[in-house]
Amino acid sequence: MNTFKSILEFQKHFDSDDKCREHLELQRWGNTPACPFCASINVTRLKNGKRFQCNEKQCRKQFSVLVGTVAENTKIPLTKWFLAMYILSNHSKGISSLQLASWLGVTQKTAWFLNHRVREMLTEKAPELLHGIVEVDESYIGGSISNKHNSVRKILNKENNKTMVFGAVARQGNVIVKVVPDTKQDTLVNAVNEVVESGSIMVSDEHLAYKNLGNKYKHTSVNHSKKEYVRGAAHTNTIEGYWSLLKRQINGIHHSVSPKHLQRYCNESSYRYNRKLLPQDERFTLALKNCEGRLKYNQLISNQ
């Protein structure tokens, strides 16, 4: 794939839906198209070049490369889909639906839906466990309470609909972020066990929930309440730096995010963080390869 020096170069390269469709076919299937209904590769391309016929007797369904992806049944041109994917996979702090609507020439409602569907593509389906020196922490996302005492934070959290997020980051490595219901010991220990490899060196603050990690991890901590922030190699500066990045995205670009959708915004942010050393075209291509899965509008707006 070409290395693009600007968004303008990207748009010039993918200047038609046919070019976008052909590139999506290549990234999704390589040179072997597969039926999204039965997974058979016994398929035939139809005369229009855009659709395929499954030749299995038990199936016989027709499909395009969009079936089974976040763009299935879309009325939005693929050129606009590709541009949105490129922007969200590369822009340092993401982009608001209002700004995306202006750039793509669509309504704000359409841009909001498109943004969320692209965020589904930026979700890691099976992230590798973190290992080595891993910093863990938790933070309230949704407003500015960073200068408040812990006793006040709990009150403000209830009043302002803050959402608790757990994060773990490997030094010189990836970050994994999960929305959690609370900061109870069972909740945080389970979160750690899900994302951190056994035997890793675990660094946290003085939160009591992490005290029982010593059997599975080599655990050390710094006591922020006593103004201890660094002790040798023990610090949580990396994960705190990530929190600053995430909050600039949420507060600076989107201003407010509902708890229901927060995980997708976290996934978007961690996707870019974990690929910050890659060229922009590679970030876009990796997102495109992760296009399978449906997200319907009713799912986004429901209260469930």
Image: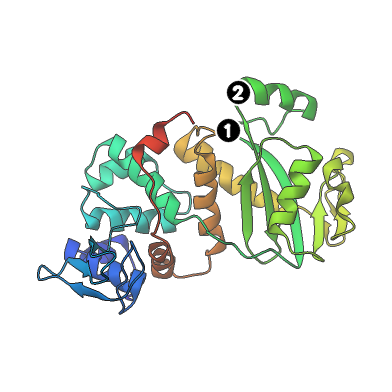
Residue appearing at x 17%, y 66% in the figure? 50
* Mark 2: secondary structure: helix
Q: In the rendered view, tell whether residue 63 sits above or below residue 299.
A: below
**Residue sitting nearer the eye, 254 or 197:** 197
Q: CA distance from mark 2 to mark 1?
A: 8 Å
Quadrant containing the N terminus in the rendered view: bottom left
Query: Residue 105, labelled with which disc?
Result: none
Q: In the rendered view, tell whether residue 238 sits above or below residue 110.
A: below
- Relative to residue 125, is residue 53 drawn left or right? left
Residue appearing at x 68%, y 45% in the figure? 166
Residue found at the very far front of the displayed protein: 57
- Relative to residue 234, is residue 138 drawn left or right? left
Q: Amino acid at mark 1?
A: Gly
**Would you identify the image quadrant in which residue 224 lies?**
top right
Q: Contact (CB < 8 A) between labels 2 and 1?
A: yes
Q: Residues within 10 Å of mark 1 (few under 14, many from 20)?
A: many
Q: Amino acid at mark 2?
A: Asn
**Residue sitting nearer the eye, 16 or 212:** 212
- Residue 105 spot, x, y in % from top left: 21, 44
Q: Is residue 3 visible?
A: no
- Of marks 2 and 1, which one's residue comes earlier in the chain? 1
Q: How many marks?
A: 2
* Mark 1: secondary structure: loop
- Residue 195 spot, x, y in % from top left: 68, 57
**Would you identify the image quadrant in which residue 89 lies?**
bottom left
- Relative to residue 226, is residue 100 drawn left or right? left
Q: Residues within 10 Å of mark 2 (few under 14, many from 20)?
A: few
Q: Is residue 167 visible?
A: yes
Residue appearing at x 43%, y 67% in the figure? 286
- Residue 259 spot, x, y in % from top left: 55, 34
Q: Which residue is mark 1?
A: 142
Q: Which residue is mark 2?
A: 160
